Image (spheres, grey):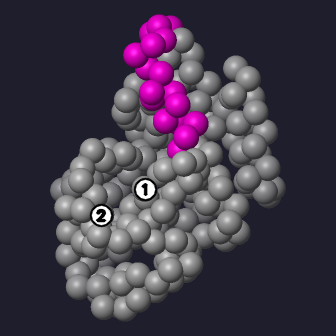
Amino acid sequence: MNRDVDINEISDGKTYEAGDMAKLGVDDCSGCHACCCGMGDSITLDPYDVYRLEKGLGSSFEKLLSDSLELRVADGVILPCLKMGENDSCIFLNEQGRCSIHTHRPGICRLFPLGRIYENKTHKYFLQVNECHKERTTKIKIKKWIDTAEFNRYEAYIDKWHYFIKNIADSTFSISETELKDKNMTILKLFYLLPYDISKDFYDQFEERMKKAESA
């Protein structure tokens, strides 16, 4: 989710590459789950997030949408996000205050407390200094922190998806409501509702769908 804020007010004033070290370690959070509460509809899911959830939970997107996800609208674009449960906490937070989908948690959760700055068709990272309630004492390589296989492919995918959605959001004031509705339906059908083959490579499937979306 894009944030209209001064980065110097929320970060340590630095930008990082994936191979850089940043002060991220908090001793496995020690039971704290403040970042899993009060998020509203801010945990937006990209297609790889859905692929991971479908694979990890053995569930379809439609089933997830019926119990643990919901659709949100931001800048005219409709995308799925995590649903909040009791006390405005993430629906996947268990009774012990721990993430029940940690191994296949969404990318935004993997990233926290880092954020991304997108420029020139790519991105860098920044460290949010006011978002985490725990004192961060240990430096960890950003690539390791995000904990995603085939990291170079993942980063290239993140850029492509970000700018694809941004281009649609930027066009919302110059296209008709019918055109915007068609674009949103294309996104939902191609990247979310159409089941992924979890036995096959995600990125190959994504590229095939992106070609169809760009030509629609």
Compute the Cα span from label 2 to label 1.
22 Å
Q: Judge left or right: residue 131 versus residue 50.
A: left
Closest to the observer, 94 or 80:
80
Q: Position of residue 190 (x, y in %)?
A: 67, 32
Q: Residue at x 57, y 47 (%)?
A: 121
Q: Is residue 216 above or below residue 139?
A: above
Q: Residue at x 27, y 44 (%)?
A: 4
Tell whether position 142 is magenta.
Answer: no
Q: At label 2, which amino acid type do we have?
A: Cys
Say what secondary structure mark 2 lies in. helix
Mark 1: give few (<14), some (14-19) or many (20+) Cα within 10 Å: few
Examine the residues drawn in magenta and state their main secondary structure: helix
User: Which SS class for mark 1?
Assistant: strand
Type of amino acid at the residue the image marks with label 1: Ile
Q: Which residue is mark 2?
A: 36
Q: Position of residue 193 (x, y in %)?
A: 62, 35
Percent from the top left, x then y, of residue 46?
54, 47
201 to 163, vertically: above or below: below
Q: Which residues are magenta?
A: 162-178
- Residue denoted by label 1: 117
Q: Is residue 102 visible?
A: no
Residue at the image position 38 percent from the left and 51 percent from the top: 43
Q: Can residue 204 be seen in this snapshot?
A: yes
Q: Nearer the viewer, residue 124 or 185?
A: 124
Residue 136 lies, in percent from the top left, at 29, 85
Q: Left or right: where does residue 17 sit relative to residue 155?
A: left
96 and 172: which is toward the camera: 172
Residue at 52% of width from left, 31% of height from top? Answer: 167
Q: Quadrant of residue 2?
A: top left
Q: Dividing the picture into quarters, in which one does residue 98 lie?
A: bottom left
